[in-house]
Image: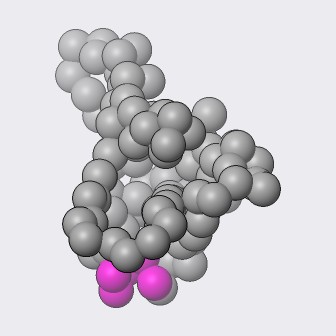
Amino acid sequence: MAAPRVAEYVQELFKNSPVEVEVLSNVKVLEKEYPCLAAVNRCANSVPRHQARVIKLQYRGEGPIQKTLMLVGKGITYDTGGADIKAGGFMAGMHRDKCGAAAVAGFFQVV
């Protein structure tokens, strides 16, 4: 599941819930606000179904907020750095590179 589809999935998952979802996909915004992501996305950016997304989830509890907890999870879903440049056949395990982002989304789903 590449980044655009992940964004659609997450938006649907949290529809009608107290979790706010913001998806950033504009290349100029990514280049300015997330330059390292934009650099890694150069190869995938030429294929619309592989273009990067930044997905922000936010939950605000009721009452006065005394602490803020921020979670960040990497979710690389394609060899964005350069179409199968991994040596020794390690691309097969790259599907696990989205586990951090999936864990954060799962945490929000439980909340």
> What is the residue that sits farthest to the front in this orientation?
63
Which x, y percent locates residue 66?
Answer: 25, 71
Res. 78 visible in picture: no
Magenta stretch: give its range. Answer: 29-33
Foreground pick, 57 / 100: 57
- In the rendered view, does 22 fall on the left or right side of 41? right
Q: Residue at x 46, y 84 (%)?
A: 29
33 is higher (above) or lower (below) than 102: below
Q: Residue at x 40, y 33 (%)?
A: 103
- In the rendered view, does 30 fall on the left or right side of 52? left
Foreground pick, 100 / 80: 100
Quarter placement of the N terminus: top right
Q: What main secondary structure does the magenta stretch of the protein show? A: helix
Which x, y percent locates residue 78?
Answer: 47, 38
Q: Residue at x 56, y 78 (%)?
A: 26
Which x, y percent locates residue 73?
Answer: 32, 46
Foreground pick, 111 / 75: 111
Res. 3 visible in picture: yes
3 is higher (above) or lower (below) than 40: above
Tally of numbered tags:
0
Find residue 34 and report its image quarter.
bottom left
Can residue 102 be found in the magenta stretch?
no
Q: Residue at x 47, y 85 (%)?
A: 28
Which x, y percent locates residue 88?
Answer: 22, 13
99 is higher (above) or lower (below) than 42: above
Color style of the picture: one colour
- In the rendered view, does 20 fall on the left or right side of 108? right
